[in-house]
Amino acid sequence: MTEASLDVVGIGNAIVDVIAKADDAFIAANGLVKGAMTLVDMDRSEALYGRMGPGIEMSGGSAGNTMAGIASLGGRGGFIGKVRDDQLGAVFRHDMRALGVRFDTVPLTAGPTTARCLIVVTPDAQRTMNTYLGACVELGPEDLDEDMIRASMVTYMEGYLFDPPQAKAAFRRAAWVAHDAGREVSLTLSDSFCVERHRGDFVDLVENDIDIVFANHHEATALFETGDDLDAALDHFRRRCKVAVVTLSERGAVVVSGDRTVRVPAEPIERLVDTTGAGDLFAAGYLFGHTNGRDLADSLRLGAIAAAEVISHVGARPAVPLTELVRSKGL
Amino acid sequence: MTEASLDVVGIGNAIVDVIAKADDAFIAANGLVKGAMTLVDMDRSEALYGRMGPGIEMSGGSAGNTMAGIASLGGRGGFIGKVRDDQLGAVFRHDMRALGVRFDTVPLTAGPTTARCLIVVTPDAQRTMNTYLGACVELGPEDLDEDMIRASMVTYMEGYLFDPPQAKAAFRRAAWVAHDAGREVSLTLSDSFCVERHRGDFVDLVENDIDIVFANHHEATALFETGDDLDAALDHFRRRCKVAVVTLSERGAVVVSGDRTVRVPAEPIERLVDTTGAGDLFAAGYLFGHTNGRDLADSLRLGAIAAAEVISHVGARPAVPLTELVRSKGL
């Protein structure tokens, strides 16, 4: 096995976020599922956008946010995801490359536009997401840069990739290529509704193909149908995969790996503003630590710090260089 | 004269901002004019964007920001400006209408793309702007909704309109229509370099066509070539137009009108983050006050509050409803 030239390659839906504030009445009036990621078609996306307040646009996407976090921590990253050759696609590509993340997936030149996620942030800082997948539905195995996957210590994929049908095939191929090269494969379960949509696939993956899995409380218990019993879900993880990192919001996070269990408290924050990207950035911190020789506890702490930064402002990517933030906290 | 159905109609360049942080070394290395608005062509815009860090996209444009502020204060507004029928044009249109601002200018269906302003914010919170005017160069007198102008108490225009050649004709026509209907006309001088480019036109306008002029210290002294002598510039204004509002950054603002001179201190802020939009929002507060029967002092105070809000966060439009902010300050 040659030395890895990248820490992590992320594969995910390449999405531009449109973020607006709204109250709970807006959530109710528009039949939104608060706190969830809901897939919408173009017509629904347009109709909802027409009713939303003024917004800001920022590159997003779960794995995209994670790669932004890893780059901000000083990690070496790559990204694979599908945009179109339109203005928002150019924004997504620019932002990824400006962070130093390798991103060479060929954009669509026709067909659906670059994906857009309409994010409504309520006064409780909760985010409700409505995603039009657009060009992402065209991501397939032919888009995989297999050399980049072989060159990365970890191939990190979002569970959301199971929504566009061809991306699922790309997911399985990427996992095979990575393992064949002696690398690790990591998955985030993404969203409890996403887990409901793809439970069979996810359980099978966690058992057979995934080395490091990320989930929050809801996703973990949804995966193994353990109701409210988080400990039961953790036991499942312990038996089925090498490492499972479970985030617990204000209660911090826990990692289980073989007979080890390590916990970290949530990093204190001045003000909770927008929870979008919390899980994505936790994964960024953990994976940066893991691929740079840190132990479970330090990796968890890095995850907690990165997540705390991103929920302290609007938007799902770091607003300050995480290298400096982490250094200021003595890590 | 029939009763006005709108407080203010703004006419300006319809621009989407791309905002990124950078240090002074970036300003120097790229030959940028710190603190100024510089016009760039498409090639230069693309090259500069390629070197900028990851950004956020937000609707902007000087008069556009002012109309956003007036709407956020509860005022009745309209906007006239030119976008193309592309993704960023749709963002600009959405954001304007979502605020309740009437905006019906027909977009271009071919030719240059929607205008983009690359904004670099340095650690001192100063902003340096590089504008590709794109579709804005096609704004002409035929785009004026003259009924809307006649229905507005004030027609407010940005000095930047003198950069695209056809917009200048639209500017003069709009002023004529407004005055013919017995309404007021207001102008912001926009930028001291813009004043240098169009000094003759601006002096002539201030003397003959403008009722309420907005400027900062640099623009005021540049207009009348009074060097550093602000008082001399204020005397010029006093003799030549009905009302002149001059903003003085951390020293507040002053309005001169006939023999009256009223000053307001700067509104205290917790943290200076990004000065983009300070002048635009000062104008918003002042014009909202003016069109809603407030006196000079209250109108200035409304300007100071709106400006203080917008420089406390990234981006040139209000992040909170200004009605609530103003109410919390007892106005």
Image (cartoon, coloured by chain):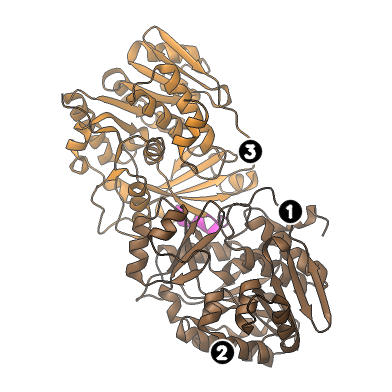
Chain colours: A orange, B brown
Secondary structure mostly taken by the magenta-highlighted segment of the chain: helix
Marked residue nearer the N-terminal end (2 or 1): 2
Q: Residue at x 78, y 72 (%)?
A: B292
Front in this rendered view, residue B17 or B67:
B17
Residue where numbered disc 2 is placed: B200
Callout 3 touching callout 2 (CB < 8 Å): no
The mark found on residue A89 in the picture is none
- Looking at the picture, do discs 2 and 1 lie on one chain? yes
Q: Quadrant of the N terminus of chain A?
A: top left
SS class, disc 1: loop
- Where residue A244 appears, as percent x and y from the top left, is 39, 19
Q: Chain of mark 1?
A: B
In three-dimensional space, the C-alpha distance between marks 3 and 2, rounded to whole angstroms, equals: 53 Å
- Where residue B278 appears, as percent x and y from the top left, is 63, 63
Q: Report whether A158 appears left or right of B72.
A: left
Q: Chain of mark 3?
A: A
Q: Amino acid at mark 3?
A: Asp
Q: Amino acid at mark 1?
A: Pro
B319 over B220 or under it: above or below? above
SS class, disc 3: loop
Q: Chain of mark 2?
A: B
Q: Amino acid at mark 2?
A: Gly
- Tell me the magenta residue range: A44-55
Front in this rendered view, residue A96 or A36:
A96
Residue where numbered disc 1 is placed: B268
B205 over B186 or under it: above or below? below
B320 over A307 or under it: above or below? below
Residue where numbered disc 3 is placed: A124
Residue A174 falls in image quadrant: top left
